[in-house]
Amino acid sequence: MTQEQFNARLRPLDVKKIRELIALASDIRREVNEPIHAAISLALGPDPKTAPMARYVLADLAELAVAALLDASIDKMPPFEQVWLCRTVVSADLQLRAAIVRHLDKMLGIKTMLPTVKSSVVLEESLPPTRVCDEAYLEMRRLLNLAESGEENSLAERAFLNFSEARKDAEIHKARQEKTWKQLLE
Amino acid sequence: MPNPWDAVLANSQRSVCRQEKDSDAHSALSPGVDVRVIVVAQGIQFNNAWFDLHIDMAENLEITTAIDYLPDLQVLRAQKTPHGLKDTFGDDLIMLDDSSASYWSEAQQVQFYIFVVSTKDLFIKALETPGLHVIYSGHARYGQGPCFGDADDGPGENWGNGTDPATYGIYRMGFPLIGIEIEEVLKQKYSISPVIADGTKPAPSLCHPEIPIGNLHQWSLDELTLDPHDNNKHSFNSADLKALLKPEPAADVKFWGFDAAGHSGYVRHILVYADWQNTGDGYDYDLGATDIQCRVFCHFGCSSFIHNFPIVRERKQWQREGDYKFAYWTQKPSTCPYTTNAWLSSILAYSKPNNSSPWEPSLKWALQHTNDYLKAISSPKWNYACDIIDQKKL
């Protein structure tokens, strides 16, 4: 789908046209996945000439190929291909995670306030104004605190948002000094 | 009073008609069609009657400064349910009357019915009806529970236990003890049962998790109305607060309270009884007295995950069983009419075969897509993202 084709389909819609927007996303996904599925088929196929080339292309596509690779059935896949697939998707995920960590780390230093948002109806509760770095810190927590339950996460996030800016800055500084974060940044 | 969904559930055992009400056209579906009934229980201030009243006022240019937060007529109309879904589904969504609609999903091969109710009794009946998908769309009342009222959202007991507790007021779903802002109690003017301070701090197991037990104070009525930043200045009149305390306290009694972030900054709170069970005084309108039989329960009021998830899932022990007893909550303040309509849109828009299939795949899809949608329609000016969650971290 070209940029013009995409624009031609999107512009006549409005954001309420959920079914049409989902169909648009689905068509894009299908088009993107078509050559990826072809590559997976060759990568897992018997041809000793095309298989390594296809595997190399898929590795280079990294995160773009992950969803399609995970859709491939491993039930009848030979052990070598099973392990190759597993290594490829994890490697792609690690590359993506490293990019996300670098991005978040930059955001952790941005102290610009977000605009004060309203609601179109009166809400009983409101959260205090936040800065870009505060929001990045919450995303950092989501990424790292895997052992934390949903309840613990919600309470910790709300507590953080209600801290003074100085205390939030101290929390962010401490988190950036953590060994795990530093290792992820390397 | 008959439940609006009874007839549909009874008919679904035989056949289902898709024609508009009073239409002569016949399009009966064969037996065995998967019929899914969604009941939306709208709370005080966010119900269709309230929206109608304000649409009428806006149309007649009677908008006052009190409601100038309401952006425009289009926004008001979009928040009605199921009316707001018309923009998404057009004529495929058939309005059966002003509070119900049907939708046939060709892709899912599922017939949906949506019924909107706005009273506590019908909400309880929906919770107790096997197989229903029940959504509460209204204020969380700081965790006290779903709260019902009519078009009048003025101050009064409907913000508490209700003028007619069977129909209006709070359906208790909260921790035994909750902290409420003094300002809120005085603004809405409803009776509360404060926790008398006897020197022994309440047990943590009784307290809402955001009550700062280490920073609880024993305050007199006069002290409760002081400005947290200035102990020589009163923010409120103690006589106004006294009139709302039930039972009426003795003159020298003290109450548990604390200062914390609230709706308008750092404000004073009072601890109140808000238990989800054994509410007492013949007040049986609580979670403890309810036999929940529905298949899905969504609480789309503010921050319901923190307020009510631990009560419903852990203390009431209403836990997921296979493809039954799903529950969804919000992690943040929620503009619930938008949250509800976005959730309904995602449920209806799911585009895979779903007839006589487990509900989980479509619910999982709806969870992701509702969150994506609410984030997408949020802007630097308006925020609708409330992060719906089941129980796992997003």
Image (cartoon, rainbow, N blue to C red):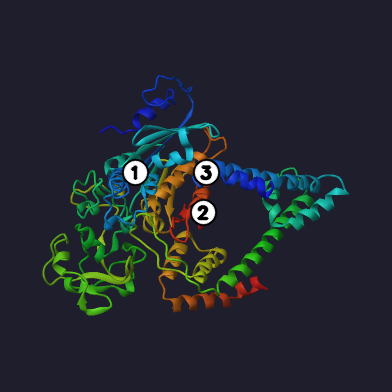
| Residues tagged by mark 2 and mark 1 found on one chain of the structure | yes
The disc at residue B41 is 1
User: Residue B219 bears which disc, if any?
Assistant: none
Front residue (pair A48, B45): B45
Tell me the residue that label 2 is attached to: B376
Q: Do labels 2 and 3 share a chain?
A: no
Mark 1 vs mark 3, foreground winner is: 3
Q: Which residue is drawn at 73% across and 44% down?
A: A34
Whether the residues at callouts 2 and 3 have beta carbons within 8 Å, the answer is: no
Q: Nearer the viewer, residue B257 or A63?
A: A63
List the residue tagged with mark 3: A18
Spot the residue most to the left.
B251
Query: Crowding at label 1, few (<14), some or many (≥20) Cα neighbours within 10 Å?
Result: many
Total number of numbered discs in the rendering: 3
Q: Which residue is drawn at 39% across and 49% down?
A: B75
Q: Quadrant of residue A116?
A: bottom left
User: Which residue corresponds to the image point at 20% horizontal and 57% vertical from the top-left?
Assistant: B190
Mark 2: few, some, or many residues within 10 Å (few <14, many ≥20)? Answer: few
Same-chain status of marks 1 and 3: no
Give the chain letter at badge 3.
Answer: A
- Give me the chain letter of mark 2: B
Label 3 crowd bin: few (<14), some (14–19), many (20+), radius 10 Å: many
Amino acid type at circle 2 is Ala
- The CA span between labels 2 and 3 is 11 Å
Q: Can residue B248 be seen in this view?
A: yes
User: x%, y% of residue B361?
Assistant: 54, 43
Residue ID at (49%, 27%):
B33
